[in-house]
């Protein structure tokens, strides 16, 4: 079975990591070094951004 293509760009992932203060971990250890709690926080932040974006589109 083919792997799913990522929905978030690498640029967005790094931007979110920087916003949460874990970008230094990503740079030194890679994504595997980020704790599952912080990964969950990254996903939560990404969902919040996506929801805001959809709401803004609906207003137009």
Image: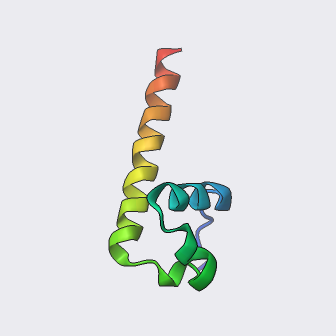
* In the displayed structure image, the side of residue 11 where residue 20 appears, left or right: left
Q: Position of residue 28 (x, y in %)?
A: 61, 82
Out of 8 and 1, give the one closest to the viewer.
8
Q: Residue furthest top?
A: 60
* In the displayed structure image, the side of residue 33 where residue 12 appears, left or right: right
**40 shown above or below 53:** below
Quadrant of image for the N terminus: bottom right
Q: Residue furthest left?
A: 37
- Quadrant of the rendered image containing residue 8: bottom right
Q: Residue at x 55, y 67 (%)?
A: 23
**53 shown above or below 60:** below
Q: Position of residue 34 (x, y in %)?
A: 45, 77
Q: Residue at x 52, y 24 (%)?
A: 57
**9 shown above or below 24:** above
Q: Position of residue 31 (x, y in %)?
A: 54, 78
Quadrant of image for the C terminus: top right
Out of 31 and 6, give the one closest to the viewer.
31
């Amino acid at each position: 079975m083919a792997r799913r293509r990522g929905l978030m760009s690498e640029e967005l992932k790094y931007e979110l990591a920087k916003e949460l203060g874990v970008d230094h971990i990503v740079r030194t250890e890679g994504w595997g070094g980020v704790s599952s709690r912080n990964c969950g926080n990254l996903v939560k932040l990404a969902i919040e951004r996506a929801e805001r974006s959809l709401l803004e589109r609906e207003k137009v």
